[in-house]
Amino acid sequence: MKTEEIANNLVKWCNAGEERKCYEQLYSPNIVSKEQGGEFPVAKGMEEVQKKGQWWQENFEVHSSETSDPIVADNWFAVRHTMDTTHKPSGQRSTMSEVGVYQVQDGKIVQEEFFYDNPGE
C-alpha cells in the first residue's frame, strides 16, 4: 500500500470507530509509538502498543472522536485527532486535540508520534 492509501484508510477507520483494523492491516509488527509522556512514552512492537491501548481503555471513556483528513509528504503523513473523553479515575471530562505523525515503510506504518498539550504535567 502507498502512504496516501494507508493515511486515507487510517482516517476512514478511525472515524468509523474501527481502530482495530488500523492495527491489524496498516501497522508493522515492529511499530514504535511515541507519546509526550504518560504511562507509555515509548511503546516498541505490537505487544507494547496493545498494552498501551488496553491502559487507555481502562482509564478513559471516549464519548466521541474525529480524525481530520491527512496531510501526506513522501513516506510521512499527519492527522489531527480530536476526542471528547472522561478520565475514569477522576471523573473529569475534557476535549483534547492531538497531532499524530506517522512514518510508512514497505507499505506499513512503522512509527507514530503524538503531539499535544499536557496541562497536568
Image: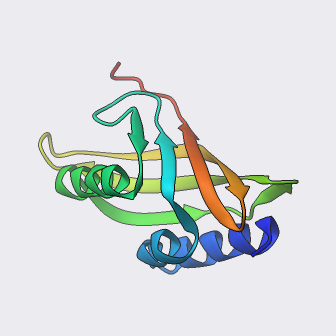
Quick one: 75 or 70, which is closer to the camera?
Answer: 75
Residue 92 is situated, as x and y percent measured from the top left of the image, at 23, 42
Residue 112 is situated, as x and y percent measured from the top left of the image, at 57, 47
Residue 119 figure quarter: top left
Which image quarter is the C terminus in?
top left
Counting every numbered tag in the picture gives 0
Which image quarter is the N terminus in?
bottom right
Residue 75 is situated, as x and y percent measured from the top left of the image, at 80, 54
Residue drawn 66% across the image and 51% down it: 102
Q: For this view, does 10 lie left or right of residue 39?
A: right
Is residue 17 something that shows in the picture?
A: no
Is residue 100 something that shows in the picture?
A: yes
Identify the colour scheme used: rainbow
Q: Is residue 97 above or below residue 108?
A: above
Quick one: 51 or 37, which is closer to the camera?
Answer: 51
Quick one: 17 or 120, which is closer to the camera?
Answer: 17
